[in-house]
């Protein structure tokens, strides 16, 4: 059993209305020091695989098919644990 | 200028309908090896601060006030860069 963290972020240049809304709310609350906020996803996945290489290959496949939109998003995969 | 990554995850035991929906979709696509999926947030924040200690204190304050719900969510702050 492998556990992976998948970090999905918007590509540079892609507008992030949710991040902007959070930034504006922080300014209203008085946190003027914040100059930018961008919001992405942290997807934790537990899966069975023979070894780490297979786990990584399977993860990249399912990210491409379902978890991230390669047109507007980048991702990083980090395998963080084995049980 | 500091850049921080804030990882917000649901606490253990808190139901994650979005994660379950993704897990079910992965099973439908044939990825039976996936046993669990949980979905959290990765919030990237850029802010001005005198030093890393002040940046971290300010970040923890704004997380408590706006970015995470301490009743159901845990968070980790990682300061990843200085410009």
Image (tube, coloured by chain):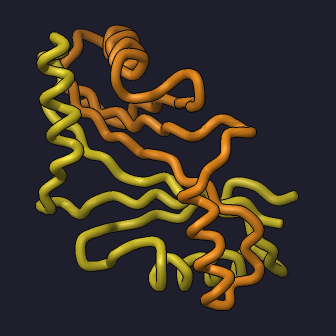
Chain colours: A yellow, B orange
Percent across and percent down for residue A81 are: 76, 55
Judge whether A60 appears above or below B19 on screen.
below
Judged left or right of residue B68, residue A59 is right
Judge whether B66 appears above or below A36 on screen.
above
* Residue A60 visible in the picture: yes
**Viewport quadrant of the N terminus of chain B:** top left
Percent across and percent down for residue B40 are: 51, 47
Judged left or right of residue B20, residue A22 is left
Give the residue drawn at x 34%, y 23%.
B66
**Viewport quadrant of the C terminus of chain B:** top left
Percent across and percent down for residue B43 are: 36, 40
Q: How many marks?
A: 0
* Residue B52 visible in the picture: no
> Can you name the residue that lies furthest to the right here?
A83
Give the residue drawn at x 87%, y 58%.
A83
Give the residue drawn at x 72%, y 73%.
B34
Query: Which quarter of the picture shows residue B25?
Result: bottom right
Judge whether B28 appears above or below A8 on screen.
below
Percent across and percent down for residue A30 are: 16, 11
Query: Which quarter of the picture shows residue B62?
Result: top left
Judged left or right of residue B44, residue A21 is left
Judged left or right of residue B77, residue A59 is right
Give the residue drawn at x 53%, y 30%.
B75
- Viewer-nearest residue: A45 or A53: A45
């Amino acid at each position: 059993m492998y556990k992976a963290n998948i970090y999905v972020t918007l590509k540079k240049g892609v507008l992030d209305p949710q991040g902007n809304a959070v930034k504006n709310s922080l300014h209203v609350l008085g946190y003027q020091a914040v100059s930018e906020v961008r919001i992405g996803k942290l997807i934790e996945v537990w899966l069975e695989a023979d070894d780490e290489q297979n786990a990584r290959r399977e993860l990249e496949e399912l990210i491409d098919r379902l978890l991230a939109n390669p047109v507007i998003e980048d991702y990083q995969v980090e395998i963080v644990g084995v049980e």
